[in-house]
Amino acid sequence: MKDICGKKRAGRKLFLLAALSAFVLLTGCSSATKTVKLKIHSQPEGAYIVYRVTGSEIPCAGEWIYLGNTPFRGVHQFNEDELENADKITLKVMRQGYMDQIIQWDGPGFWDEAEEKGVIFWTPKLIPEVKN
């Protein structure tokens, strides 16, 4: 009887060790995400909002990504590595007949502001384009 119980315990320990190893490998290989709250308004409202992340280690670096129209209230998940390795994170608002407005951070600065204030809040005043 002792021999059977000893084999069962060894089997359970081996299974537990294998499951724990698999968990560590899976979570170690996946990048964590950071959720950032965004509140973006504009004067006047109705502007398009896009953002871009640039950096040598960033997939799709330099591509503009559409977020929505102002007023915008939402969350966006960033890859943690993306924020740490970003050279610049740029938000831009655009509306026909007005000049584009941008705001920029480096990756760690963007995350610091989001974490410190709890939200990235931006309300640019759009300037009408002057036509000659």
Image (cartoon, rainbow, N blue to C red):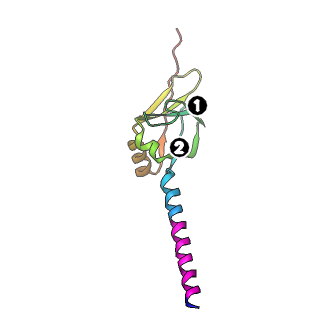
Reply above or below: 43 against 82. Answer: above
Q: Position of residue 15 (x, y in %)?
A: 56, 71
Marks 1/2: CA–CA distance: 13 Å
Q: Position of residue 130 (x, y in %)?
A: 51, 15
Residue drawn where x is 41% and y is 40% of the image: 85
Image quarter (top left, top right, bottom left or bottom right) of the N terminus? bottom right
Give the amino acid at mark 2. Lys
Which labelled disc corresponds to residue 39?
Answer: 2
Residue drawn where x is 58% and y is 31% of the image: 47
Give the amino acid at mark 1. Ala
Reply above or below: 121 against 104. Answer: below
Question: Is label 1 in a helix, a strand or a loop?
Answer: loop
Residue drawn where x is 54% and y is 84% of the image: 6
Q: Residues within 10 Å of mark 2 (few under 14, many from 20)?
A: some
Q: Which residues are magenta?
A: 3-20
Question: Is label 2 in a helix, a strand or a loop?
Answer: strand
Q: Position of residue 4 (x, y in %)?
A: 59, 86
The residue at which mark 1 appears reads as: 47
Q: Is residue 4 magenta?
A: yes
Q: Is residue 54 magenta?
A: no
Q: Residues within 10 Å of mark 1 (few under 14, many from 20)?
A: many
Depth check: give the residue in front, 17 or 108. 17
Depth check: give the residue in front, 128 or 121. 121
Overall secondary structure of the magenta section: helix
